[in-house]
Amino acid sequence: MENTSNTLQFRKKKKTFRDLSILTRIRLIVILSAVVILAGLVVYLLVGFKVRNFTVEGSTHYSAQEIRDMVINDRFCENSLYLKLKLKYKKIENIPFVEHMDVQIRDRNSVHIIVYEKAIAGYVVYLENRMYFDKDGIVVESSKEDVPGIPEITGLSFDHVVLHEPLPVEDPRIFKEILSLTQLMNKNELDADKIYFDEAGKVTLYFGDVRVPLGGDEYLEEKLKHLSEMLEKTELSKFSGKLNMEKFTPDNMRSSFSYDEK
């Protein structure tokens, strides 16, 4: 009798879903439905907004992969929704050679980066480091690495260099001249190893062992265009000597080459 009584009590305590009241059933259904919906939403946000397409525009100093690593710098940034919210409150800053970046979320799986680079005019060598400066002469980066397309500037006088401050030269107007010159060189696809400014402001370009005195800034654009054509045709950079273009004018396109003595 005692065993039978215990069995009856156990059956009374064990309730099934059918034994619950209608209100309790509804509550359980709502909770379970909410859990399922929430789980589905989490999966959708994690998988549906994963960055799969990443494009970069305007970067010459960094590869697309390097820019990607700068922007997506933790596992949460792989999610475009999170990335958009993060960049809304925290900009990408303090990247050498980069003024700022415009991060565009094209769609839930695509991110497009527009890189606005600093206008680097050239670099000077100081204490065995390359000190890169912008159009205003402000030193933006110190590095031992050689950045392709940015020439060494020699002939400037200064006694110290401070990062993020202007080079302390006697006449700061020289930096606009340097930028104008390097932009014209880029336009004419001239990649000089070194640019020398003498005390009078006259310019000499160096291409390997070839020196090209240009003189002052008169007819500078015409000189560089003619020089580009000459270098392309004659491959002067293979020689050692001086190509004098100081007396060059559009009406008198004279230049003379003298070989160095061996």
Image (cartoon, rainbow, N blue to C red):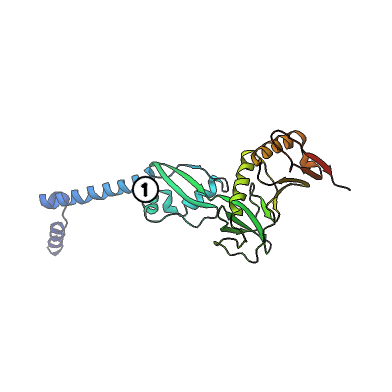
Q: At x 62% / y 42%, what residue is drawn? A: 184
Q: Of 223 and 137, which appears nearest the observer?
A: 223
Q: Tag 1: residue type?
A: Leu
Q: Of 46 and 94, which appears nearest the observer?
A: 94
Dot 1, crowdedness within 10 Å: few (<14), some or many (≥20)?
A: many
Q: Residue 213: image x %, image y %?
A: 74, 46
Q: Residue 72: image x %, image y %?
A: 46, 51
Q: Of 231 and 14, which appears nearest the observer?
A: 231
Q: State the residue lying farthest toward the bottom.
A: 159
Q: Residue 126: image x %, image y %?
A: 66, 62
Give above or below for 169 relative to 54: below
Q: How many marks?
A: 1
Q: At x 62% / y 61%, what residue is drawn? A: 170
Q: At x 75% / y 33%, what residue is drawn? A: 233
Q: Quadrant of the image for the N terminus?
A: bottom left
Q: Of 180 and 187, which appears nearest the observer?
A: 180
Q: Mark 1 points at which residue?
A: 81
Tell me where residue 168 sits by quadrant. Answer: bottom right
Q: Residue 65: image x %, image y %?
A: 54, 47
Q: Relative to 1, is 103 on the left or the right?
A: right
Q: State the residue lying farthest toward the right.
A: 262
Q: State the residue lying farthest toward the front.
A: 251
Q: Relative to 141, is 213 on the left or the right?
A: right
Q: Relative to 140, is 242 on the left or the right?
A: right
Tell me where residue 11 sits by quadrant. Answer: bottom left
Q: What element carries label 1?
A: helix
